[in-house]
Image: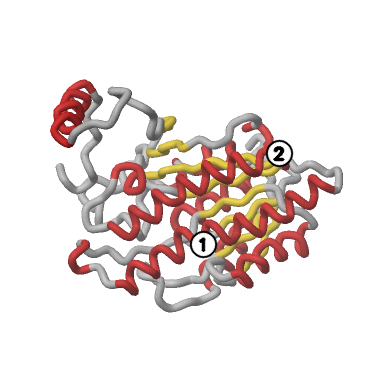
């Protein structure tokens, strides 16, 4: 490894398994000191246990790295505050925050209960906002004290949040919200030396193994495992390092050996009458604009 993150302190939420675990190990391999956060809950967010986070810490320390476990609920103010405090107490600083924690409560909209909506919004969207808020407060204080950080935040969105996904209305809405939060945080926090980006990863994890069961099987014979979570982590590590200077407010898809810069909403065909439309005129004009526009990508699950 190159030591890309030597001296940096990195917090990864939801790092006990899957993508978060891969990110934590990859940061440690590049010299970072890592705070491994995980509640140890099930796929639907129920239950809890300290085992997964501590196992990742043990893996890192066994390889000669430095890491500590954090088992707090980062979707609460106290848990998010203690997450940042753990980094400061253990390592004296915080340089990079990777927001990754989440779980699924998939239902078609007509069957989606309010509790399942709230639970997914809480862990994904609030679970991004609160750690970001507490980390940002620390970095702002550092900047105002004349110690401008070289700080990085990597948020975790999803293709479901960019395109939609049948049966995942709650998850897709939360992941779309994370993109909006990323853009706002990038604009607000740049003055304090903080860069904020988002990834939309595709990999084989507990959350995706049923959805992509037919296409995500590991290869036989030691070939390239295109859907391994570890394939996403190199981009995350680079975004979390000082080497990613001036890259902020961006969303990247990462899957297998592919990295894509996602280009979000931007003005397309436009018509301006210079006066109020009638409903009929508005409809006729809209149909002409749609005919000239790029067709949208299909929602996941519709093809």
Residue corresponding to mark 2? 191
Using residue 59 as the reference point, say whether residue 106 is left or right of it.
Answer: left
Using residue 271 as the reference point, say whether residue 185 is left or right of it.
Answer: right
The answer to which image quadrant residue 3 occupies is top right
Mark 2 Cα-neighbour bin, 10 Å: few <14, some 14–19, many ≥20: few
Q: Nearer the viewer, residue 206 or 180?
A: 180
Q: Where does residue 130 sit, x and y in percent of width and height?
A: 58, 61
Instruction: State which quarter of the image contains the N terminus.
Output: top right
Q: Where does residue 111 sit, x and y in percent of width and height?
A: 19, 69
Q: Residue at x 70, y 53 (%)?
A: 33
The answer to which image quadrant residue 4 occupies is top right
Q: Residue at x 32, y 23 (%)?
A: 274
Q: Nearer the viewer, mark 1 or mark 2?
A: 2
Q: Where does residue 6 sit, x and y in percent of width and height?
A: 72, 42
Q: Please, which residue is most extreme toward the front here?
A: 275
Spatial CA distance of label 1 from label 2 is 24 Å
Q: Which mark is residue 127?
A: 1
Q: Residue at x 39, y 46 (%)?
A: 228
- Any part of residue 61 in sight: no
Using residue 251 as the reference point, say whether residue 56 is left or right of it.
Answer: right
């Amino acid at each position: 490894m190159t030591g890309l993150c030597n001296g940096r302190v990195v917090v990864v939420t939801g790092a006990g398994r899957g993508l978060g675990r891969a990110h934590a190990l990859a940061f440690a391999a590049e010299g970072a000191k890592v705070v491994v956060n995980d509640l140890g809950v099930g796929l639907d967010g129920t239950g809890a246990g300290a085992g997964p986070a501590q196992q990742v810490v043990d893996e890192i320390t066994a390889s000669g790295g430095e890491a500590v476990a954090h088992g707090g609920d980062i979707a609460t103010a106290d848990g998010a505050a203690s997450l940042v405090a753990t980094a400061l107490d253990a390592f004296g600083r915080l340089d990079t925050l990777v927001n990754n924690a989440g779980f699924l409560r998939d239902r078609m909209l007509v069957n989606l209960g309010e509790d399942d909506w709230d639970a997914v919004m809480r862990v994904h969207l609030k679970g991004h906002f609160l750690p970001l808020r507490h980390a940002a407060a620390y970095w702002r204080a550092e900047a105002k004290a004349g110690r401008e950080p070289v700080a990085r935040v990597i948020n975790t969105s999803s293709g479901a949040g960019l395109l939609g996904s049948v049966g995942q209305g709650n998850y897709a809405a939360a992941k779309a919200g994370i993109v909006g939060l990323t853009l706002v945080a990038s604009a607000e926090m740049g003055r304090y030396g903080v860069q904020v980006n988002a990834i939309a990863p595709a990999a084989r994890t507990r959350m995706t193994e049923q959805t992509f069961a037919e296409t995500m099987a590991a290869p036989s014979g030691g070939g390239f495992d295109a859907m391994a979570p570890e394939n996403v982590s190199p981009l995350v590590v680079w975004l979390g390092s000082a080497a990613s200077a001036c890259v902020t407010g961006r969303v990247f898809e990462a899957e297998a050996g592919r990295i894509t810069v996602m280009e979000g909403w931007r003005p397309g065909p436009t018509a301006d009458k210079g006066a109020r439309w009638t409903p009929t005129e508005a409809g006729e004009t809209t149909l002409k604009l749609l005919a000239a526009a790029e067709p949208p990508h299909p929602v996941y699950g519709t093809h």
